[in-house]
Amino acid sequence: DTAVSQTPKYLVTQMGNDKSIKCEQNLGHDTMYWYKQDSKKFLKIMFSYNNKELIINETVPNRFSPKSPDKAHLNLHINSLELGDSAVYFCASMSTAYEAFFGQGTRLTVV
Amino acid sequence: AQSVTQLDSHVSVSEGTPVLLRCNYSSSYSPSLFWYVQHPNKGLQLLLKYTSAATLVKGINGFEAEFKKSETSFHLTKPSAHMSDAAEYFCVVSDRRDDKIIFGKGTRLHILP
């Protein structure tokens, strides 16, 4: 069973559209994250949730809105997509031993 | 605040020679440290982790790393490089104080035939 799963794996969309990326973890962790990997491969934290509550919001544009319906899910909704949003987005969860588990990434291409 | 510095953005070694990828961290609390590998157009794969047990950590594919608190380092090594090791490697730190997982900027490992 996949521990942290993201869908879709690839997403190609036009500027101005609204899209969502879903993330689910079956590890029972309380803490989940979204990271953005830019073209230079740098991974930057976007959001952190703990048991459905927002903990970290790293000055991400408010076009990005995370939603956590329960502690196993942390979805990322993006409004009015821009060219600069093209990147690989990674979902992660963290155990109580502070070990991180990552999804396989969603490659978003805005055209 | 915690941080991670990967000292080399690119490392080139010949196949069959040792690999050393350097990582220094800063953390005001007991850190957990990780190395991840990312092959082109692939996701992140955990190579190994340090979570306050043995300071010499063995990982997959012959990699290992040593946690040195006095030097605040967690360098990744492998005795003999293989062509399939060519990838991007990330040193990662998490600590108990703020629940953040912080990535280094990555080191691209090139393997020369």
Image (tube, coloured by chain):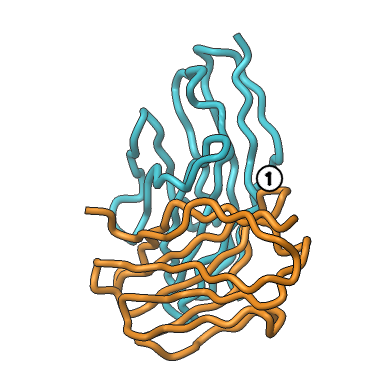
Chain colours: A orange, B cyan
Is residue B80 toward the left or the right of residue A96 in the image? right
Task: Report the front residue among A89 and A110.
Answer: A110
Residue shown at the point (55%, 77%) measured from the top left: A47
Side (left or right) of A8 relative to A69:
right
Q: Residue furthest top?
A: B113
Quadrant containing the N terminus of chain B in the rendered view: bottom right
Q: Residue furthest right?
A: A83
In the image, is residue A40 above or below residue A24? above
**In this rendering, position of residue B39 left or right of residue A64:** left
Question: Percent from the top left, x then y, of residue B14?
Answer: 60, 14
Q: Chain of mark 1?
A: B
* Above/below status of A12 relative to A78: above
Tell how many labels: 1
Residue A14 in the image, given as x and y percentages of width and height: 71, 61
Tell me if mark 1 has few (under 14), some (14-19) or many (20+) residues whose alpha carbon lies within 10 angstroms of its own: some
| Quadrant of the frame with the C terminus of chain B | top right
Q: Amino acid at mark 1?
A: Leu
Q: Is B39 drawn above or below residue B110 in the view shown? A: below
Camera-side residue of B28 and B13: B13
* Relative depth, front residue between B7 and A84: A84
Q: Residue at x 55, y 41 (%)?
A: B89
Helix, strand or loop status at disc 1: loop
Residue B40: percent from the left, percent from the top?
Answer: 57, 35
**Residue B41 falls left or right of residue A8:** right
Judging by the rendered image, the residue that carries numbered circle 1 is B7
Where is residue B50 shown, x and y percent of the image? 37, 54
Please name the residue shown 71% across and 58% down the image: A110
